[in-house]
Structure formats: structure tokens, C-alpha cells
Amino acid sequence: MKNATASFLIVASLLTILGCKKDTPKEPYKPYQYSAPYNVAPCFEKYIVELEKQGNLRGKNLDFKKNGISVQTISAKQMNEVAPGAWGIGSYTHGAPDIAILESLCTDDTTYSLSLEKLIFHEYGHSGLHRNHLCGVKGDGFAESIMYGTLGNPSTKACSYGITDDYVNQRSYYLDELFKSIPDSLLVFF
């Protein structure tokens, strides 16, 4: 019994000695801040620069280098599995807009394509502005929104075929419409 008591006292003494630490100053609380990635395929870089510029011209404080965005390519096979017939898809993941564009549209061509711009801006409407497809038609017979969607799959909430836009001649209208009445709170990346 004496050995058990002695062993207990030795273990208790060691734990007391080892448990003593100098008081270290506590670090002030810092809330977790997610740093969303800026991950843009080089062939799409000029379109993201233009998107940021156009949003800022319309009073939106877009800063993709700070807040993050991803615009990457996707194979036709992968796209067909996710959104059959689509050229691009947009979602909001990892705290930032996430856009995938068919890899066949990513070329070394240095020409600026308004068709590709419209596609990327439309997908940003889904992923960065949380907008759905809008199916209205203006009096001139053109789509009233850059968010007009024409996929044939009813589950995509797409609009009917046959309606087009006049993006080339009415670009300013469609860009104004893209950013109109979007609360700044929806542009905050968290």
C-alpha cells in the first residue's frame, strides 16, 4: 500500500510540475476570412477585366482580384453531362463566382468576341449576381435581358427558342440591364 501511495504522489507531483506554464498573452480574436481564389483561364482574362470595368461603370464595386472568381474550360462531354446543349454554366462555389465555358471557345485568337463576352457576362449573372433566366421580349422583338436563356431542357427554366438579342447594337442596354437593381449586398463575396 505504501508503494501505491508513493507512486500516486510521484505521478501527482509530476503532473502538477508539468502542468505549470508561464502565462502567454492571448492573441486577439480574428474572424475567419476566406480568401476566394482568382482563377481565370488566360483566354478569358480580357473578358473578366471588361466585366469588372463595366460593373464598376454602373456603380458596382467589382474587384475580382480581391474577391475572387473562377472562369475555366469544360469539355463538351462534361458539359453535356451537366447542362446538355449549353456553352457555359455558372454557379457560386468556394466563396466566389464559378464559371465554366466550353473548352472549344478558349482559343489563342486575340480578337475580342462580343459573343463570348455575352456568354461570360450571362454566366456571371447566374454565378455572381444570383440571377435566373428571364424570358421577356422587348417591343422590337429582341430579348429584354442578357439573362434570356434558350436551352431546350425544361429543368433549366429556359426560355423558348427563336428569340435572340441584339447584343452587338444594344450592348449598353444589356449591360445596364445586367447590373440594374442588383443590391450591392449580393456582390459581397463571403
Image (cartoon, grey):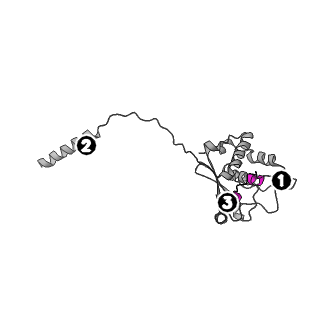
The residue indicated by pointer 1 is 166
The residue indicated by pointer 3 is 103
Q: Position of residue 103 (x, y in %)?
A: 67, 60
The residue indicated by pointer 2 is 15
Tell which circle, 3 or 2, labels the residue nearer the N-terminal end. Answer: 2
Q: Position of residue 58 (x, y in %)?
A: 74, 41
| Residue 67 falls in image quadrant | top right
Residue at the spot 74% in from the left edge and 65% down from the top edge = 152
Amino acid type of disc 1?
Asp
Q: Position of residue 180 (x, y in %)?
A: 75, 45
| The stretch drawn in magenta includes residue 114 | yes
Callout 2 secondary element: helix
Tell which circle, 1 or 2, labels the residue nearer the N-terminal end. Answer: 2
In the rendered structure, are the residues bearing label 1 and label 2 in contact, judged by CB atoms less than 8 Å apart? no
What's the CA distance linking mark 3 and mark 2? 63 Å
Residue at the spot 25% in from the left edge and 39% down from the top edge = 17
Residue extent of the magenta highlight: 104-118
Query: Residue 46 versus residue 156: which sits nearer the camera?
Result: 46
What's the CA distance linking mark 1 and mark 2? 78 Å
| Residue 78 falls in image quadrant | bottom right
| Residue 74 falls in image quadrant | bottom right
Callout 3 secondary element: helix
